[in-house]
Image (cartoon, rainbow, N blue to C red):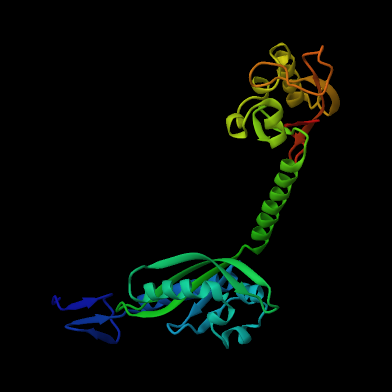
Amino acid sequence: MPSSSLRCSKSPTQPRTRGSQTIRWSPVSRTSARVEAERFAGAFAAAAQGMALFSLEGGWLKANDALCEMFGYTRDELLAGDFQRLTHPDDLESDVALVTDLLTGRRQRYQLEKRYFHRTGAVIHAHLSVSLVHDSMGRPLHFVSQVQDFTQRYQAERGLRESEQKFRSVLEHTHDAFVACDATSAIIELNQAAEDTFGWRRSEVMGRLLDEVIVPPRKREAHRADVARFLQTGESRALDRRLQLPGWHRDGSSVPCARPRQRPRFRVSGEVVPMRDSRHTAAGVVAGP
């Protein structure tokens, strides 16, 4: 066979010329291409996440059901516009710049978190993945986009951040000392009042064991035993009760309080409350007056 001829099978069909070479496509190659196309079409239509094909000019070519449902449009309504109409204006410039990188060959694909508009005007937070499809000659044909909606997760995380900020504000403005520990009795939270009461800065005690910081030496073994009992059985002699507990200052002295001077050591009247996770498993304790 001459070096200038490429054959795909012993039963060639109509030849196709590429430069000085002649490529002959066989029925087998046509069948394989058709099977691949059918597989892609099936996966495209059945995908749980939004998928779309875009022209090089940014117009919609094809959209699956998941994407139509995500944006609240029928397929005909969606295909009648372009992606810029649905893109949040603050995210449009970065998206267009990345598309330009694809077309100029500076990158093969890109991903970013992006905001879209639902038909109702509500903002959709989504993760976008885009790649550029080329033909057999290396010429760009169209874009393939995958859009995954994470709006619910975003709103939940934002709500958690706002809740934590409110919680932090309450802690910092209360006059009561507040100390929280995890299941190992390591300190995970300490407010300003607790810093003032026990003489430690928050940054110095985070991660340290509670009994090493504010529990007097003579009470440490009892404290450790009670925490261990709570973690193993869920029961405790001291936890979840309002008790009077001895306090211990950073310098080893008793914590000062408004008590008669003839009693050098005071007792902190406080409540030690158990923390449990979503499965009601012991997760730590919170101590406060």
What residue is shown at x 26% (from left), y 86% (from top)?
15
Vertical comparison of 119 with 238: above or below: below
Nearer to me, 259 or 126: 259
| Residue 191 visible in the snapshot | no
- The picture places residue 26, in percent across and down from the top left corner, at 32, 79
Q: Which quadrant of the view contains residue 212?
A: top right
| Residue 52 visible in the snapshot | yes
Nearer to me, 218 or 228: 218
What residue is shown at x 75% (from left), y 45% (from top)?
170
Q: Is residue 242 left or right of residue 56?
A: right
- The picture places residue 235, in percent across and down from the top left corner, at 81, 24
Q: Which quadrant of the view contains residue 210?
A: top right
Nearer to me, 3 or 107: 107
Q: Residue furthest right?
A: 242
User: How many numbered marks have been drawn onto this rendered protein structure?
Assistant: 0
Quadrant of the rendering where the N terminus is positioned: bottom left
Q: Residue furthest left?
A: 2
- The picture places residue 62, in percent across and down from the top left corner, at 53, 81
Q: Which quadrant of the view contains residue 227?
A: top right
What residue is shown at x 65% (from left), y 30% (from top)?
187
Q: Residue furthest front?
A: 261
- The picture places residue 49, in percent across and down from the top left corner, at 59, 67
Quadrant of the rendering where the C terminus is positioned: top right
Vertical comparison of 101 with 257: above or below: below
Nearer to me, 212 or 265: 265
